[in-house]
Amino acid sequence: MARRSPHWTREHACKVIAELEASDQTMAQFAREQGVSPERIGKWRRKLRLEAEGAGPRFVELVARRESPPVTVRVNCPSGHQIEVEGVELLAGLRLALQAVSESARC
């Protein structure tokens, strides 16, 4: 009897895809081990990528007119995550925060 996959939530999909990307397995091997179809994982990967691409700006230009005193930069993501960079010059802090957002945009 074939196993029926549970209904995937966004959080579950993010977790499974992160585990796949951290593994050294192919998608087919990983899916077989998880008891789901590779097509389901591919579907969620595409869906999350599209969400991430539409979630924020594709290009941000940062220009410093002068140095600022050390600040704390916080970015609140639509997912509810918060990225915080402390004790940095404003421009450097924004660059670091935006880099962290782009690297974690999948979830």
Image (tube, helix red, strand yellow):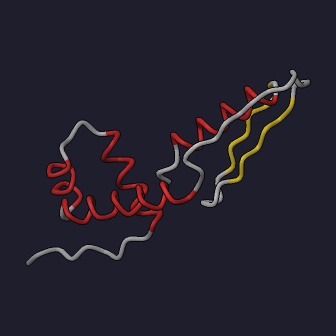
Measuring from the top left, give residue 29's x and y in whole percent. Answer: 15, 49
Number of numbered discs overlaid on the protein picture: 0
Q: Residue at x 76, y 43 (%)?
A: 74
Question: Which residue is farthest top?
Answer: 67
- Foreground: 90 or 76? 90
Splitting the image into 4 quarters, where does residue 22 fall?
top left
Q: Nearer the viewer, residue 63 or 31?
A: 63
Q: What's the residue at 18%, 44% (across, down)?
A: 26
- Residue 19 screen position, x and y as percent: 35, 47
Residue 18 at x, y percent in the picture:
39, 48
What percent of the width, then of the height, locates residue 14? 43, 56
Is residue 18 placed above or below 23 in the rendered structure? below
- Rendered-image quadrant of the N terminus: bottom left
Residue nearest the observer in this picture, 51 or 8: 51
Q: Residue furthest left?
A: 1
Q: Residue at x 67, y 31 (%)?
A: 95
Left or right: residue 2 compared with residue 107: left
